Amino acid sequence: MRNRTIFLCGILFIAWLAFPALTVPLTAPCNVEYIRNIEKHYPPTWPKLSSWRDLLHTGTYDQITRVLQSRILPRRLLIGAKKNLEFHLLREPRLAGVDRGSDGWLFLRETYDRSWESPERARHALDLCDAFLTRGTRPRTALRLMIAPSKYTIYPELMSKTSAALAKRYAWYHRTLASRWSRPGTPEQIELWSAYRQARTETSDLLFFPKDTHHTPLGAMVMLRTLTKSLDPGLWREEDVRTGEEFGWEGDLAGYAGVVLPQDRYRRRSIVRPGLTLLGHDRPAPPEDEWGPVERFRFTSRDRPLWPGRTLIAHDSMLKEYRTDLAQFFADVTFLHYKDLIGDGRFLSTFETYDTVILEIGERYAVDILERLFQPLAPVRPAARISPAELGLPSDRVRVLEQNEARLVLETLVPEVVLRLPARDLDPRRSYLLELNVHAAQGTWCRLYLHRFTPGGGSVLQVEDKVLWRGPNRAYFYLTHETLGYPPELVLSQPNRYQLGPFSLIPLEEVDRPADPAPVRVWTTTWRSRVQAPAIPAEVCGNSETELHPAPGRLWIESRGADPQVFLSGLPAGAGSRLDVELVLWSSRETLLQLFYQSPDEPGYSEARSLSRSLVPGENRLTFRLPATAARRPMRLDPACHPGWYGITGLTFGPTRTHSGDRDDRVSLTLPAAASRPVPSTWLAEALGNSQVRLDLQGDRLQCLALGDDPSLLLPSLERSEPGPLRLKFRIEAPTETLGQVFFQTAPGQVFRENNSRRFSLHVGPNSVSVDLPSAAGLYPLRLDPGCHPGVYTVQEFAVSGADTDAP
Amino acid sequence: MVFSSLIFIFCFLPLVLLGYFLAPRNLRNTVLLVSGLVFYLWGAGEVVLVLLVSIAGSWGCGAWALRAAERNRPVEKAWAIGLGAALNLGILFFYKYAAFLISQFFAGLHWIVPSLALPSVPEILLPIGVSFFTFQSLSYILDVAWGRVTVRPGPVEFAMYIAMFPQLVAGPIVRYGDIKDQLSDRPTTWENFCLGAVRFSYGLAKKVLIADTVAVITDQAFGVTTTPGPALAWLGLLSFTLQVYFDFSGYSDMALGLGRMFGFRLPENFNRPFAAVSVTDFWRRWHITLSSWFRDYVYIPLGGSRTTSLRTYRNLLIVFLLVGFWHGANWTFLCFGLYHGLWMVWERIRHRRLPEDFQHPLAHRALTFLVVMLGMVWFRARTLPHALGYFQALAAAAGPGDGLPEIPRLNWLCLAVGSLAVFLPGRICFGRWLEEARSGWAAPARLALLTVGFGLSVMFLISNDFKSFIYFQF
């Protein structure tokens, strides 16, 4: 008997060990799908070994472990089994942030446990909103805010006791919002709480899905009715609401908790307003954002009223599914997800182009969103930087397209990708702002983890969330000097494409502020002073990557590599405690400039005695504040970290401005603008490819490896000062007979459309292409689709001719 | 790589088992050696070179010492022994203690001369299991020195003794003399394999189902941002005590099970430590191979207990300070050692050492558990102030603090099951019973372990890896 059971144990053990390997064909695809859909991860890929040393690197084995673990097991089955065991057998009241209520209802705890919020922050956000409206320059634009209530505020009696107690603790949040909303005046608000509560008394049907955070079709109709009636009571007619077939709904909360629950069935509802004529429906071609494209509907009607003028509806997830229903009440309405708006105080420009702006915001994120939309622009005073090249990246979770001193372009393949910033020794007398410059392909959010270690050995974790809007973002994180003693971590929340510039550290609150500088002897040097006697000439030379081209009124610096350096010597001595250096510099591209100075104690150049500034294409006016002792020493100017052309048109040295602004003893000189601008030779280097393209710049040739039949390149705008006809010439080598296309924009932010494009046909081998573009083209980015077949395309000899731009 | 990982259970172990049992007998040690190195490489990367240096150095010095002994050259032998010991102690010191000692030295300097600018101490990556493999090498060198080992082992045999993956990174600390016969000849039978599998599954269940689950509670109490109140402090301490026990003893069970699958009988490392009725008794049952190592190589050479009482107390304190320091380079571990050393001295003064000395064993068992549990504060605390603060919280002297957090029912259940280990009769050692019992209960217990226990463990392992996406915030 003993031997038999022992024998059986051995067989069982072997069966367990072999089971996953034997079922790989069955489980691997299901696991991969599970990871993609439920866990929102990108299945890890096998590591790439570039040398034998990789075999000694633990990262290689971690990667292999992840690959194998994600594929060899029936994850879905096992995870589901455990979650269901906890949920059904142990009657777990909470799973993964989902609370169990009564009658099978589930609630998302985050909606009533935002413990990181504070009443001050809520009030601040609301004040920002009010202040924004008073700054508005176009008062006829009406802003209407609609806070979408959280489920628990409408069905509080279905919460568990624990949840109800928590909700009570954070009831101030709801009260703060509601009290602001009950105040008359702008912005007008669309009050939904009372509408939902009223609807509950009128019907026994559910307004919210029990296992989901969103409202049912009936709840949506209540929202639409309230919204339209708040605009014009005559817009809404109950008979326009049509009831459709039943559908099953599993609920996002069930999936979030990881449990399998029976589906509930609901009846679809939609709006059909007869007598409307659709004049236009603009909708960009796929791929779309997860939260829907920017979409515009234009309707007209003889007998049904429509809300007049241009309306913008920036919505959250509650209205997302009901765009077509809601659109029928408006003459001209544009829908977008609110994350596609421009944040960081630049919302005003969007706001002013519409007659009515309606913001639908989920209650739980109202404060966050209001703050991001309406906060004024922060000051820009960069002092030191953390270069993108220094960031630590999880190689298996991101695809790095470019990483250098000036920028990091990457695609995150999974949610919650953690980038590790280097630690910095900061001045203990100051506090700092960490400035994050990031361009996001889609709106999303990021989070910064800052660890602050206290002298007693404890540690405080500071977590900062920031919304990232589609396009360029500038976000600020407040730091104290001890915070950067430990590497902070930046969490990028969603799979997305990002371009990160250098992180600037902006010093604030200097404790031991030096006294106002004493008057100093003033001197000035410019390159024009080489020919004009009064100024003291400086001696200039460049390193091997730099060629200097003096020209009237300007010193051209041609950078042939990524590390151009210009050495300035023969500079006379200054005096006083501080010295300002003002530099006017024309840059051919977005890059980073760094000025190195020396101190008498420590000759030589070091990062510690340098100041950095970001450069944008075109003219940049920069001011550096240096210790006065720096002036008597040679300096080094690294104008960029890219190849390209950079032109210095003015360089002024002088003492620090006094508080009175008295600068009589300074001589500043700005040289006349150049007669013509060179077209940047690195224009092609700034091209961005879509997911079907891999780009490789070889000298002045751009090689595009098209992986699919829709390769596409985004080219930056040309240096054009004003509109005019434009001819684009280039040579392109095609792998097959195909058709290319150039898209252009005539307004900023415009979608690339067929009617704003020019096609050209290509045959195998080299082709010369000449495309005439209309007046405004080139002021904004261009899109080049080199062909519609996979293969290698080589683009070179790009030439632009037009009214104000000569061919290079 | 750890035993309680999916990659080990479902990839590494099946491949090694296949390789081992398909290989001819004379190549089996080589298979185990290679698999041990791969196992180490997987988790430690290039640090595997340190392991190889330790193996090569110890084997070379041992061989040199043995040859010197054969030729009756005591000075040469002493050089060889000294070199071998210095090599292993040097590795241990450099990787484990150097950074700590330098930083403490700098802190002292800074305290004396606050304006002194001191360089930052470089971070040294601690090789996994360095304390274990250096101690094994050291035991071999010392056994050679004291004439307990007289025959030079083959290089593969010796390397396999150090790098055998079942005991490489977390023990048990096996002495060469205890295993030398098995290195050359061992019974690899089907029965051994099956019983090893049972023991492995038992260890896996202890580690995954109990230790990892109660760790959630521990982390709540000892978290960086937590200021625990008395209830949370006591609950956290209980859960940590259980976590440490189930984690380490589970790992030892897995090691013993794996060893048995390959025909080895490794020494037991735990023997129901919470059934101990005194701290002395506790150390006879807890991490047995470590305490016996210190007993044989430090305590007895210092004179042990066959000397004056004062010297005995001194010896005890030295040994336990070293035991504490062995656990980690931190003042908290020194305090842990000192705490236990002082209790041992106290018990020796009171002549209360062995179970038979006690009239009320249950009361003493409870008292010992309390003493051991309180000692775990030193073990878990990050710093001395943290430990002192935690003691204050236990004594309700640090203000109300954080109350009991919301703990999932599953974790409560696992804590309750784990607590049974404290209350079970002392004579029951379930791990050994599973291997040796012939009673009617043993068969269903083994089968249940291999079906339910193993299945649940895998389910928990994969679920721990699962992180439901953070609900998208917009």
Image: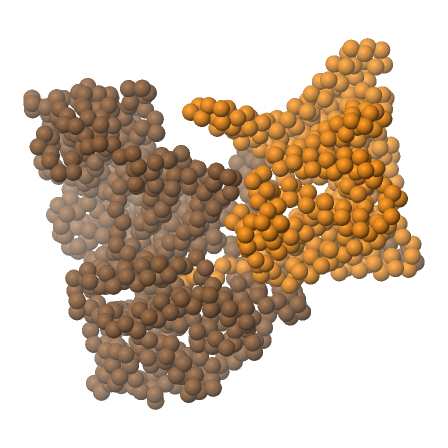
**Residue name at image x 7 percent, y 23 percent:** A534
Judge by depth and name the residue closer to the eye, B206 or A732. Answer: B206
Q: Quadrant of residue A740?
A: bottom left
Judge by depth and name the residue closer to the eye, A8 or A487. Answer: A487
A587 left or right of B321 in image: left
x, y percentage for residue A600? Answer: 28, 19
Q: Which chain is brown?
A: A
x, y percentage for residue B4? Answer: 69, 48
Which quadrant would the C terminus of chain B be assigned to in this image?
bottom left
**Residue name at image x 68 percent, y 52 percent:** B238
Residue B135 appears in the rendering: no
x, y percentage for residue B194? Answer: 83, 50
- Colour displayed for chain B in the image of the structure: orange
B412 relative to A260, above or below: above
A143 relative to B470, above or below: below
B182 left or right of B413 in image: right
Residue B425 appears in the rendering: yes
